[in-house]
Amino acid sequence: MCAAACLTLAFVYLLVWANDRGARSSLLFALVALGAAAFAFCEMWVLRAQTPEEFVLAVRWAHVPLWLWTVSMAGFVFTYLRAGRAWLLWSVVGLRTTVLVLNFVTGENLNFLEVTSFQRVPFLGEPVAMASGVANPAMLLGQFSVLLLLILVVDAGITAWRRGERRQAVMVSGSVAALLTASAVESNLIVWAGLQLPFTLSLFQLVMLAAMGFELSRDVLRSSMLVRELQASEARLRDSQQRMNLAADAADLGLWVWEPGSDEVWATPRCCAMLGLPGRAHFSLADFTNRVHPDDRARVTQSLRSTLEQGQAYEVQYRVRLPSGAERWIQATGRVDEAGPGSARRLQGVCADITERRHAEQEALRLRRELAHAGRVSMMGQLASALAHEINQPLGAILRNAEAAELFLQSDSPDLDEIRAIVADIRHDDQRAGAVIDRMRALLTRQDLQTRPLALGELFSDVRLLVRADAAARHIRLELAELPADLPPVQGDRVHLQQVLINLIINALDAVSGSAGSDRWVSVQARQRDARFVEIVVSDSGAGIPADRLVQVFDPFFTTKPGGMGMGLAISRTLVEAHGGQLRADNRPGGGAVFTFSLPIATALAVA
Ligand code: ADP
């Protein structure tokens, strides 16, 4: 019965080990059970021995399964509890093997040097063999090996207990230690004290195996529960992935993950389609960069690198070239994801096809450019009559000077110094007219926003040239204040800023012309607002803007002038904002309007 029970246990755990070769403790447990099964057979043989010779032979062979049992038990406790001392383990193995050898080479067997009496006595209703004789001293070594095993088991049990694995410690170490002690007591009583009892070691072994088997089966139970939990959590993961994919699809987003360690990019089908890599769930970074437009490639790889190195958020817009030759704009955002300490870094994020948005943006930019240009043309129309005067004046002077020079030349001895002075005047007047025409031409050409560091003095003198005639014609004092010497240059586009400033000045001139006051002026000042911005202020002595219209004046087509278009301030605000600044309207405490706009300081922008 013992043998059958042990064999069943051995078979079960051999099967467990066969399916999971990593489970070394299952293999060792199966060997312990095999040893116990074989020992039970030998023990039966001993009990049934008919002669003293058969008795000593059976005892001798019983030591072979006992060796297997001891050695694999030591290994099992050591592996299963992940505790114990390796030197103890190897001592048990070495000593028990020596004992096995001594069993075959000394006396009748390990237990008897010589059997002096043999009898068959009734035990539990059956005659069983029993013998006594001269004990083999080598048996002490065998008992010492059992003692070492006991120490190993107790020591490993204490370690496991301290680690908090109390149940395992009690079930494995406790049961092994208790039963080892009990069986040792029994065999010592029989051999040394001559107790009239047969050996029943296998009964002890069966109890021990049952206790350990119970503990191991809890592990099997736990792993089957873990499998179920794993299946449930996998199902939840699949669910959440499906929900995420649904959300990403609804938002028209693609998802991607890049693992730099394995250089593998995983992407959803939508993301692959956006990048022109359809039907590929995995691809390398090189596959991806090959798709990126050559002009954008360096920017994309640089951005990826700095995200990985500095952990910044990854955000980049780039073009991809599809196999069909078409071009698409993609916006990708992502961040570094560290799954745990020491694990590989990876980058994951989303990408969106923004081709249509980019086209719309470009279209809006084009329209804004056209509008700004139209605004400039209309502004120049308003200035035209005053500018005609600005040009006519030097032209008239040139004509008069040329006539005077002709008169001088008609005399026999022309005064050459006088003629030289006249020619110098002609050149000066010509340059004056030329400068006005140049500025007008610059304003009338169509031009993209091109910012560069720009000294405000330059801007003010251009503007003065174009508006002073208009101001003079309306008898309005135009004060373009001296600029502070330490005023830093701004980052701006010369033509566009001229447009803003002229527009504000013309509006101010209009407002002053329409008001009845005697002190008629328009003033332009510039000052540094803070470390990053310069402010330009255009104020006038007009009637100001009713408080409820301070915001409205910037609306397109808002005008209070009979022939007005209402686009000037709307365009000016767009232009200032395109520079990174702001334009606002206020009223002066003493009456009159104040328009203030800010522009970024060139160096501050460069640093930012
Ligand atoms: P327009 O000059 O064609 O009317 P703007 O957009 O330049 O278009 O100006 C819109 C309106 O803002 C003007 O009609 C005027 O009512 C008001 N406005 C602009 N500048 C001033 C100012 N300096 N003083 C008073 N009102 C002003």
Image (cartoon, rainbow, N blue to C red):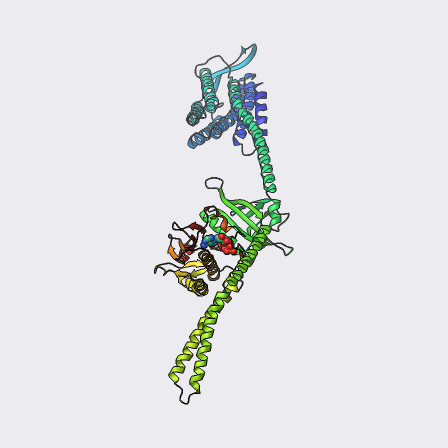
Residue 156 percent location from the top left of the image:
43, 27
| The N terminus, quarter of image | top right
The picture quadrant where one finds residue 246 is: top right
**Outermost residue, bottom direction?**
412
Please indicate, yes or no, whether residue 509 appears anywhere in the rendered image.
yes
In-image side of 189 versus 282 (left or right): left
Q: Number of numbered discs present? A: 0
Look at 37% across and 60% down and name the residue there.
481
**Outermost residue, left direction?**
485
Viewer-closest of 185 and 362? 362
Q: Is residue 107 above or below residue 498?
A: above
Residue 328 percent location from the top left of the image:
60, 53
Viewer-closest of 229 and 473? 473
The picture quadrant where one finds residue 94 is: top left
Look at 40% across and 81% down and name the residue there.
420
Residue 455 percent location from the top left of the image:
40, 61
Please indicate, yes or no, whether residue 574 appears anywhere in the rendered image.
no
Viewer-closest of 331 and 545? 545
Q: Is residue 84 above or below residue 423?
A: above
Residue 100 percent location from the top left of the image:
49, 27
Viewer-closest of 50 and 490? 490
